[in-house]
Image: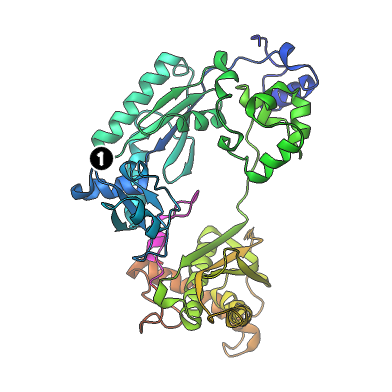
């Protein structure tokens, strides 16, 4: 692995040059310079660490964060101390209690996690620009030319870690990975937890990765692992031993050789991504898993999704209702086409058409309708650009042709009222009476709510 540059210095030139080399045997390939370009910071046991920071009585104790107060739900976070007992995200609460008798359980406070997230970002920005916010507890920072030497990068990482502990909270430890590209920096951040710091220099690549599993690489799941195995690739060593073109053929798809180059430390341009769905789901508490509480909860989720759709300037063309019954590990789902819309009332009307199908599926189950989780997702979304005013806006308000114009205006008015006066200042349908769970804003993996969502 020499230091000769790959043909072309631009992103397109680099990719083109690497493709031209992809048919050469791996031992004689020449690579461009591969300095340390990325610092990836992963906060340790983030939700549980925030709870320990807020409540000193939890510090140093095995703690899990749960969405509801029920043994039938699962942990959405486990403290460093709880993980020593084999408890992790996704462990059922009843099983966690069995694994650790001294376990403490605390309810999730998602608004607090977003507040701490923003404080941590502000602290990181004091030391280095934040290039990508990857999730609520992970950020990636591209290093400048005067920061990409090993000594300078390590010193920067120590300053960031210490600054977060001192200025945000002593319980907020982090693991940092430093590498020539973002994928490798992410891998490095996972190698030493908690409170770790791992540097992967070009000279060590890809040999230093051979002790990892294929599943440790972001983008490789069980299906891809099986596909690679069918082609004779059982580990990272065997994948890297292939020529880039052959490794790409085993991977399949367009640009299948990207992973080969990334594992060798080459920095490639990001593939463009676009948001395609907006949705919310909710795990129902045991006493609210009947038909009517589920229907009311689904309506609240649909209203939240429609509000986000308008705030982002999108409209949707498809509505999906999905759920999971207590006696079934698989998801039930149904969908219905929408006219391209961002109107809450159009979305609710479509949901009313779908719900009888969920009701029928539940009634046919042993023990009757018992739904554990319900979700509503708006799909096939597109940006609202150059929107024309309605031809029917000037008609009498009671004219059927003016209905959608009126209801969309009403939806937007509800957004403004709730933003000013708080969540549920105005809504559609019942919110009280003991028939519905409180549907608040939650942090999904990979998506951080805007603070405005906590007022929806």
Tell me which residue sits at (64%, 44%) in the image.
222
Tell me which residue sits at (18%, 49%) in the image.
57
Task: In the rendered view, tell whether residue 291 sits above or below residue 37.
Answer: below
Residue 394 horizontal side relative to residue 146, left or right: right
Residue 342 is situated, as x and y percent measured from the top left of the image, at: 58, 68
Q: Which residues are magenta?
A: 438-455
Residue 393 is situated, as x and y percent measured from the top left of the image, at: 60, 79
Residue 177 is situated, as x and y percent measured from the top left of the image, at: 46, 28
Residue 58 is situated, as x and y percent measured from the top left of the image, at: 23, 49
Residue named by callout 1: 169
Q: Is residue 450 magenta?
A: yes
- Does residue 388 appear in this view? no
Tell me which residue sits at (62%, 43%) in the image.
221
Question: Dot 1, how many residues are within 10 Å of its Cα: few (below 14), some (14-19), or many (20+)?
Answer: some
- Dot 1 falls on a residue whose secondary structure is loop
Q: Nearer the viewer, residue 365 or 279?
A: 365
Task: In the rendered view, tell whether residue 376 sits above or below residue 220.
Answer: below
């Amino acid at each position: 692995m020499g230091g000769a540059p790959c043909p072309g210095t631009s992103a397109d030139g680099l990719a083109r040059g690497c493709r031209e080399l992809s048919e050469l045997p791996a031992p004689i390939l020449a690579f461009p310079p591969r300095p340390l370009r990325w610092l990836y910071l992963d906060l340790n046991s983030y939700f549980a660490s925030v709870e320990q920071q807020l409540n000193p009585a939890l510090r140093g104790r095995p703690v899990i964060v749960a969405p509801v107060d029920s043994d039938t739900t699962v942990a959405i976070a486990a403290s460093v101390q709880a993980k020593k007992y084999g408890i992790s995200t996704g462990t059922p609460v009843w099983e966690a209690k069995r694994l650790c008798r001294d376990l403490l359980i605390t309810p999730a406070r998602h608004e607090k996690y977003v507040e701490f997230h923003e404080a941590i970002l502000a602290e990181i920005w004091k030391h280095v620009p934040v290039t990508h916010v990857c999730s609520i507890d992970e950020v990636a920072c591209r290093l400048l030319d005067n920061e990409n030497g090993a000594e300078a990068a390590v010193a920067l990482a120590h300053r960031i870690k210490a600054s977060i502990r001192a200025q945000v909270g002593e319980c907020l430890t982090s693991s940092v990975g430093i590498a020539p590209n973002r994928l490798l920096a992410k891998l490095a951040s996972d190698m030493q937890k908690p409170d770790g710091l791992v540097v992967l220099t070009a000279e060590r690549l890809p040999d230093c990765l051979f002790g990892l599993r294929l599943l440790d690489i972001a983008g490789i799941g069980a299906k891809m692992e099986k596909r690679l195995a069918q082609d004779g690739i059982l580990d990272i060593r065997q994948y890297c031993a292939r020529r880039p073109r052959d490794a790409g053929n085993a991977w399949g798809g367009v640009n299948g050789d990207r992973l080969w180059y990334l594992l060798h430390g080459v920095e490639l341009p990001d593939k463009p991504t676009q948001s395609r769905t907006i949705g919310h789901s909710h795990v129902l508490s045991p006493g609210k898993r009947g038909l009517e509480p589920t229907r009311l909860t689904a309506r609240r989720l649909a209203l939240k999704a429609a509000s986000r759709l308008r705030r982002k300037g999108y409209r949707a063309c498809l509505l999906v209702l999905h759920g999971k019954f207590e006696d079934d590990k698989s998801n039930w789902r149904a969908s219905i086409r929408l006219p391209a819309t961002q109107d809450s009332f159009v979305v609710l009307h479509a949901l009313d058409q779908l719900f009888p199908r969920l009701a029928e599926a539940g009634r046919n189950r042993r023990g009757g309708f018992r739904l554990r989780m319900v979700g509503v997702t708006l799909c096939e979304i597109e940006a609202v650009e150059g929107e024309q005013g309605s031809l029917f806006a000037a008609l009498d308000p009671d004219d059927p042709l003016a209905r959608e114009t009126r209801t969309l205006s009403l939806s937007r008015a509800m957004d403004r009222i709730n933003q000013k006066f708080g969540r549920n200042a105005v809504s559609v349908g019942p919110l009280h009476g003991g028939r519905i769970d409180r549907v608040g804003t939650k942090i999904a993996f990979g998506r951080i709510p805007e603070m405005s969502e906590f007022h929806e």
